[in-house]
């Protein structure tokens, strides 16, 4: 097969590959909202942008990691566009930032605690700073 024929086939194939845009995920709810220190707890995140359509009637995972402070969430499973689960590791008592890492960017989603104070979603204020959302945005 000639080089030009191979190049033509490669170019034709590349033209058929759809463009994929990965969004930055957002979290709107966490259940349960308070974590245990012992770990092994299955946590469900609800939000948007956890997976994206691949252009061929399938889906690609967008979220690559979930971090609770420096602790890595275990067994991250993307259930749907709007839901994912992960298993918590053992961790020290405290309040930690909840990060969702993805192909579309990393998002600091809120603060989560092992002390019973629940999950606080962080929202951006008009001046670009982050603040805790109102209590009615919290999931207990």
Image (spheres, helix red, strand yellow):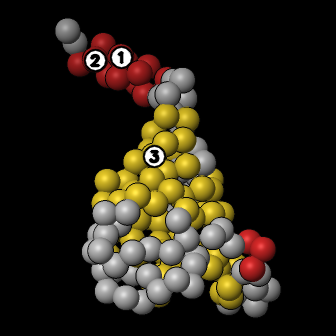
| Mark linked to residue 96 | none
Question: What is the x, y in percent for residue 124?
Answer: 71, 81
- The Cα–Cα distance between marks 2 and 3, rounded to whole angstroms, is 38 Å
Horizontally, is 140 left or right of 35 in the view? right
Q: What residue do we see at 49% from left, 51% from top? A: 84
**Which residue is denoted by mark 1 in the rendering?**
9
Question: What is the x, y in percent for residue 6?
Answer: 28, 17
- The Cα–Cα distance between marks 3 and 1, rounded to whole angstroms, is 35 Å
Q: Dividing the picture into quarters, in which one does residue 109 lie?
A: bottom right
**Which residue is denoted by mark 2 in the rendering?**
6
Q: What residue do we see at 45% from left, 39% from top? A: 60
Horizontally, is 88 left or right of 120 in the view? left
Vertical relation: 26 (above or below) 114: above
Question: What is the x, y in percent for residue 16?
Answer: 49, 23
Q: Dividing the picture into quarters, in which one does residue 31 lie?
A: bottom right
Q: What residue do we see at 68% from left, 85% from top? A: 132
* Mark 2 neighbour class, 10 Å CA radius: few under 14, some 14 to 19, many 20 or more: few
Q: Is residue 48 visible?
A: yes
Q: Are marks 3 and 1 in contact (CB under 8 Å)?
A: no
Lower position in the chain sequence, tag 2 or tag 3: 2
Vertical relation: 27 (above or below) 23: below
Question: What is the x, y in percent for residue 98?
Answer: 48, 75
Q: Are marks 1 and 2 in contact (CB under 8 Å)?
A: yes
Q: Foreground: 96 or 6?
A: 96
Q: Secondary structure at mark 2?
A: helix
Vertical relation: 51 (above or below) 44: above
- The Cα–Cα distance between marks 1 and 2, rounded to whole angstroms, is 5 Å
**Which residue is denoted by mark 3 in the rendering?**
78
* Mark 3 neighbour class, 10 Å CA radius: few under 14, some 14 to 19, many 20 or more: many
Q: Foreground: 135 or 23?
A: 135
Lower position in the chain sequence, tag 3 or tag 1: 1
Q: Foreground: 128 or 117?
A: 117
């Amino acid at each position: 097969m000639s080089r030009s024929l191979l190049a033509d086939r490669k170019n034709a194939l590349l033209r058929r590959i759809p463009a994929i845009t990965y969004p930055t995920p957002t979290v709107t709810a966490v259940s349960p909202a308070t974590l245990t220190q012992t770990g092994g707890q299955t946590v469900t995140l609800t939000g948007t942008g956890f997976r994206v359509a691949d252009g061929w009637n399938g889906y690609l995972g967008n979220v690559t990691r979930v971090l609770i402070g420096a602790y890595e969430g275990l067994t991250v499973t993307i259930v749907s566009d709007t839901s994912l689960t992960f298993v918590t590791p053992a961790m020290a008592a405290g309040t930690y930032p909840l990060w969702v890492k993805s192909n579309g960017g990393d998002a600091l989603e809120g603060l989560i605690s092992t002390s019973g104070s629940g999950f606080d979603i962080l929202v951006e204020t008009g001046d670009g700073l982050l603040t805790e959302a109102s209590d009615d945005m919290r999931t207990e």
